[in-house]
Image: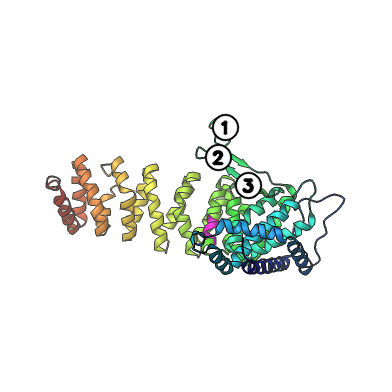
Amino acid sequence: MVRREASALVWDAHTKLMKDSISLAFQYEPLPHPPLELPDFPALPPADSTDLAQQALGITSSDRAGFRYRLEMVIESIEPDYVKRDIDPEASREKWISKNAELIGEKILILTIKDWLILALDESVPNADRWYLASSVLIGLALNSSKIARDGCFHLFSSIVVARPPGNWPINKVTGPFHMEWNDNQTTDFIEEIAHPTGTLAANAILDILSMNENSANSILPYWLENLALGPHVSSVLSVPNRIESAISHARGDGLAVLIRAGIQSFSNDSERSREILSAAVLHEDIFGRRTVASNLSRIESDDPKFALELMKKLLVNLDSDTRILATTYLGGLSRSDIISFTEFAKLVIESGDERMVQRLVESGIRYYLSVDSKDSGNLIPALWVSSNLSARSQLSGLLLELGRINPDSLTAISKSILEIDSEAHNELFKRISMRSQSIGKII
């Protein structure tokens, strides 16, 4: 068991965070109305944050046994191994708890919200008082924007959407052969929980509040929207594509990247809005937005190949070098799915004069290109060799050596073209090939 001194620190951190969360939530009042209530006993919203905080403190103070139980649950789940292995584990645990009192207190508060929501969302006897306690603390924690709240409160938010007590079920569930319960005789691979009408109202109110706070709008809301974007029904009733599009112009860094992933995930539900989101991301002043789109071009292609090519064309001329490199990487996959488009965009990369882009092109797509078109019908290789740096030429010479064994005539034609463009580049080609194979070097 935890000794009194450490648990007292956790208690203080827990109650302070609870009161601060309620106070913060009231800055964005009114609080959402309960999804469930008894017809004969309509819910009465709390008058102010002070009264609600006192009510919350009174309930938790009278349930010290519940607090100790939650404390032990949290400790058991996150206690480091070095504490358990210590020669004096009780003293080590006391020290560790004292040092991490705020973190443990927040996790306990999330468990408390869960218990309150179980009562508030009980269809038989919904408890409106517990609803206002749970929703205000949940909103306050989300506004406070900690990673713990981001990851630990979403399943509580999900329970509000469907107006059901929190459990071990998600809003959306994807099944497949990687799951033990998958049945290949079933035709439905996607199972989505249906949102409750009044739960939707409450959930929309919470998302509106999070969008009004700069911290939560960039560190909590994007992650929740990404989780919500998968299901067509929930995405629609919570206006997820609209929220993503609205939030993306103000987002920065990791939050922006997550919103873009959410936009991609929304493709199957609202393809037109997803295209608008991604088009805006390509023009976003934050480089994280452009890089995220560039690194997800293959994913976008699976939903809309033509649109992926439009985005890549813009990204290949972006001012940010890393964005251009990421877009060039996508060409490797394109060489396997659309050799004509690959050839077209490979020429743009070669003409750019960017050695890093040219090197990435050699690394990612040229081997497959030559395997399906040993004659180099697109006439890529001569200009590619001339534009390549030493590292890229080293790899490309190995590919040309293989080409010489398979199609000597093609290598001879490529060699002549290189000579016409740059004699020094041709001399280096001859040296590199001859060092590896004198017989193939003779045909250059």
Question: The magenta stretch spans which residues?
Answer: 255-260
Depth check, front residue: 350 or 441: 441
Report crowding for label 1: few under 14, some 14 to 19, many 20 or more residues within 10 A (C-alpha): few
Instruction: Name the amino acid type tagged 3.
Output: Asn
Q: Which mark is residue 354?
A: none
Residue 64 position by quadrant = bottom right
Above or below: residue 336 compared with residue 17: above
The reply to whether residue 377 is in sight is no
Above or below: residue 236 compared with residue 8: above
Q: Earlier in the sequence, mark 1 or mark 2?
A: 2
Report which residue position mark 1 lands on: 186
Report crowding for label 3: few under 14, some 14 to 19, many 20 or more residues within 10 A (C-alpha): few
The reply to whether residue 12 is in sight is yes
Q: CA distance from mark 1 to mark 3?
A: 23 Å
Magenta-highlighted stretch: main secondary structure? helix
Mark closer to the observer (3, 2): 3
Q: Looking at the image, which residue is at 23% across and 49% down? A: 398
Q: Disc 3, disc 2: CB below 8 Å?
A: no
Disc 3 on helix, strand or loop? loop
Depth check, front residue: 228 or 68: 68
The N terminus lies in quadrant? bottom right
Q: Which mark is residue 175?
A: 2
Report which residue position mark 3 lands on: 168
Q: CA distance from mark 1 to mark 2?
A: 10 Å
Farthest residue, direction front:
87
Disc 2 on helix, strand or loop? loop
Whole-percent x, y for residue 215 in the image: 60, 66
Q: Disc 1, disc 2: CB below 8 Å?
A: yes
Whole-percent x, y for residue 245 in the image: 59, 57
Q: Is residue 67 magenta?
A: no
